[in-house]
Image: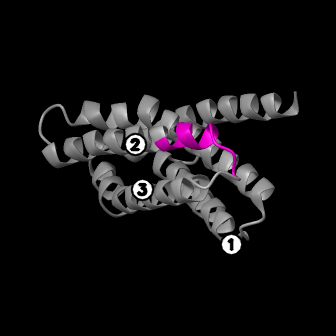
Amino acid sequence: MKQQDAIALLKADHKKVKGLFAEAEELSDRATTQLKRLGDQICMELQVHTEIEETVFYPAVKERTQRGHKEERSMVLEAYEEHALAKTLVEELQNLEATEETYKPKLKTLQELIEHHVKEEEREFFPATREIIDEEQMVELGRQMMEIKQQRMGAETEEAEV
């Protein structure tokens, strides 16, 4: 089986989270238990996704932009800032019950932020990144990211079972 490259892995995460947000939007106002479950899953997915981007992918891109590639470097720095905002919302959501009146609007705000971030990454950042990182390294980054992701998701699953 061919190893998934970093961008393919990140796009798969984007698609999964988009689907979870769509599920949450379709819930009735009374489906607070399901909303909380989906909200928690979205938060967990985003936490792991931002971790693999910030510890593996972004540093690799940033390293390649030391000499030139100002636009790509700027995109990396902007992505870090968007992550910071998302992390704040994730933390706030995790500390709320889905029955609280601010839960759904906060989840919607997170969704809009993530949709904006994903659009920029997939339309501008990822294509630019493919220009400065070769396929072999992209696959190696994907391998490193998948390793971290599997560790984190396994740990999250184990915690949920306790």
Q: For marks 3 and 2, give the CA distance.
A: 8 Å
- Residue that label 1 marks: 26
Disc 2, SS: helix
Q: Are marks 3 and 2 in contact (CB under 8 Å)?
A: yes
Q: How is the image coloured?
A: one colour
Q: Which mark is residue 85?
A: 2
Decide: few, some or many residues near mark 1? Use Cα within 10 Å; few <14, some 14-19, many ≥20.
Answer: few
Please give left or right for residue 27 compared with residue 140 in the image. right
Which region is colored magenta? 89-98
Which residue is the extreme one toward the right? Answer: 162
Residue type highlighted by circle 2: Leu
| Image quarter of the C terminus | top right
Residue 96 drawn in magenta: yes
Residue 99 or 138: which is nearer the viewer? 99
For the point 52% across and 40% down, the residue is: 142
- Residue that label 3 marks: 113
